[in-house]
Image (cartoon, rainbow, N blue to C red):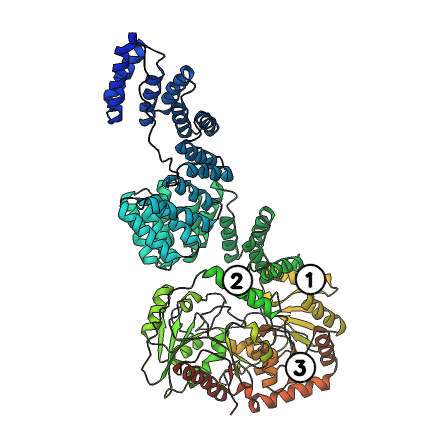
Amino acid sequence: MSRDNGSPEHYPPPRKEPASASEQAALLARAIGLHRQGQTDAAEPLYLDVLREAPRNADALHLLGIIKAQRHDNAAAAELIGQALAVDPGNAAAHANLAKVFIALKRLDDALAHYDQALTLGRDNAEAHNDRGNVLAMLDRPEEALAGYDRALAIKPDYAHAHYNRGNVLQSLERQEEALAAYDRALAIEPDHAEALNNRSTVLVALKRHEEALVGIDRALTLALRDAQLHYNRGNVLREIDRPKDALAAYDRALKIAPDHLESLINRGNALRDLDRPEEALASYDRALAIAPQSAEAFNNRGNALRSIDRLDDALTSFDKALSLKPDYLDAQNNRATVLRDLGRVEEAGQAYRRILEQAPNYELALGNLLETKLHVGDWRDYASLAERIRTAVRTGTCPIRPFMFLAISGCAAEQRQCAQSYHQQQYPRRLPSAWTGRCHTQEKIRIAYLSADLREHAVSYLLAGVLERHDRSRFDTVAISFKARADSGTGARIANAFDRFIDVSGQNDSQVAALVRDLEIDIAVDLMGYTGGSRTGILARRPAPLQVSYLGYSGTMGAPFIDYIVADRIVIPSDRAANYSEAVVHLPNSYMPTDSARTIAPLMPTRDDAKLPQDGFVFCSFNNFYKFNPRMFDVWMRLLKNVDRSVLWLPTPNAETTRNLLKEAESRGVASHRIVFAARTGTNADHLARLQLADLSLDTFPYGGHTTTCDALWAGVPVLTCTGEAFAARVAASLLNAVGLPELITADLGEYEALALKLATDCVMLRELRAKLARNRTAMPLFDTDRYRRHLERAYITMWERHQRGEAPAGFSVGDD
């Protein structure tokens, strides 16, 4: 941001000389006349002629110094004007001009001293007050700078440059509304002040008034079309308003004017990443590094591009280079740690996040990433303090962690909503333009698009496949918008064949996919991912469909205005807790979760010896993801093992670090390591369901309970014990147990949960009766009645669509059972 000194050089009139010096005076007058006409080459020798005759002629010394300054020979200028002041210390103009020379020489304290001298000699000099304010701004004394501009404006209210400089300082203080007013006053006086237009636009961006900012920059460009910085700033605003293609064109125009404009090259790469063109982004960052090989920012952004195309080792090298240039670059440190986590070097990643927090305790991204990393490997050191810090941050309106992971940390539905809302606001600080134009669709069938990266061998597909296959084709058109290419696996092929159209959008960016959904005239866009890994909420943030629904993949609120409905039931979201969800709540009967009655269980069940389980011991199991485990839950499980002789806890396949951590946690609670049995990987889901039948009792987690894992256990005939909480994620197993007719396995707190688990493990008759009841209910109760569920879901879609066609806003409703 440049400051405008705003005044011409001071050319004092020739001083009157004694009559004996009349020839010298005439010569000086001639030199001054030529100087004022811009003929410095002609004026300079005349000044020198004067000084040969009168070496102490103050005017000649001063004005020759000005010529040197105009030619950027600031050292010579300072010497000459200093000599002039030694002869005539009362020359206010010479003090002001010497101050300008000292600014160029970066001798700011000396510049300030000479402006003070100039103003002592003449306090009504508006230009000197303005210029002194600029020096104070450079010395990081903003309040004094503002006082200087105010004094200049008291003398000269229509002084545009002082208003402009005042706006710059107010902007640096983040007093944006006042800065805007100052720029407006400058432009009212001087409408063609291009820099004021540009800086005013920067303020408008900070105030989230992006369209106005763009108008201002475009106006500035009519005045200075060849200004590369203006084109660069225009590109930045266009990126802010989700116009990456136009932003790219703006950066390219800046680079045509100034091919070595570093910031344009870097942000050009960022725009290419926005457009999902990472290879081209890399080329742009490499061009930037060819110009500025010491640019830590270019290396950091290059690392992000490499990570997006899974070149993780190269990304790590790039982040390392950024940090070698700028060791305290927190974003690069955080990105590097995340790549370490992606590479499976979890312990190193955790150490890196901890180092960031040691340097910057309030760097919240590292705080959330650290706890997430630790949860994935069962490292619960400092769990309580880290979790509380994250919850405190969420309660104060920030979001240091992904909402998906927050479900495992806080069981408070209000906190979960706050986390989701804060995350949404961080990701989309302003509402993106709507892709859907409001045009009514005319097709006879309701056209539904399911958006997901998980239409393959994935838990969501295991649950949903049967429903998709049974959709009523006379009423519904179904489209898959898949974020990954079609999979040839058994489930992947089955899912793909269940849709009327399966569209791979893995090569398209969010704007392109939103346009596709709009052009397909989708009536209801169903998001199967929420905030889970691989999700692309940016598509729905662009509102490509008239109705948008959160369903199945994410058990929490999105906290976003672009999701209209959430599919639930009266157990996962009781009516009196609907206020904790930003969406209108749709209650399905029985359970919100679909199931597939065609899921196969491998016919050959392994033996307990095959699974390394005890023949006559009680087998507790929990096949939930390790990030759902926590110290409090593990305390309960270890007490159960100690109180039930020869019992074991059967867990999923871990990596080496998770194995080490969980065994250490067990031993610290007095449980021998052989009491924890880790399951081997199976070839197919059907094989897993077959071996799952070896368990006696499945133990749910809290506060983020099992979803598909609970369904797996019940389908395999294994009772599941759960503890309900307040939020959706803690109530899913309760919903499933109720729908399969086993409400007696739902407990209200962990004390009751532990007591019932102990009773079931020690009362073989009770457990045998429960298993028999589950075997009977699998086919008799609603949970595994896929077609019945399909009818309920379709009724929900029809009701949503009919409300929309009547012009009614989304609102909660319930679907009746058959």
Q: Residues within 10 Å of mark 2 (few under 14, many from 20)?
A: many
Residue 138 position within the rendered picture, expressed as x and y whole percent measured from the top left: 46, 36
Image height of 468 relative to 638, above or below: below
> What is the secondary structure assignment of the residue under circle 3?
helix
Q: Which residue is mark 2?
A: 422
Residue farthest top in this picture: 20
Q: Residues within 10 Å of mark 3 (few under 14, many from 20)?
A: some
Name the side, left or right, on which 28 lies relative to 141: left
Cα–Cα span, label 3 and label 2: 36 Å
Query: Of tags 1 and 3, which is closer to the observer?
Result: 3
Q: Which residue is mark 3?
A: 745
Q: Tags 3 and 2 in contact by the CB under 8 Å rule?
A: no
Q: Which residue is mark 1?
A: 665
Tell me the kind of residue under disc 1: Glu
Image height of 763 relative to 414, above or below: below
Report which quarter residue 25 is drawn in.
Answer: top left
Quadrant the N terminus occupies: top left
Residue 444 is at least partly visible in this image: yes
Mark earlier in primary sequence (3, 2) = 2
Tell me the kind of residue under disc 2: Ser
Residue 802 position within the rendered picture, expressed as x and y whole percent measured from the top left: 41, 84
Residue at image location 75% in from the left, 70% down from the top: 642
> What is the secondary structure assignment of the residue under circle 1?
helix
Report which quarter residue 115 is drawn in.
Answer: top left
> What is the secondary structure assignment of the residue under circle 2?
helix
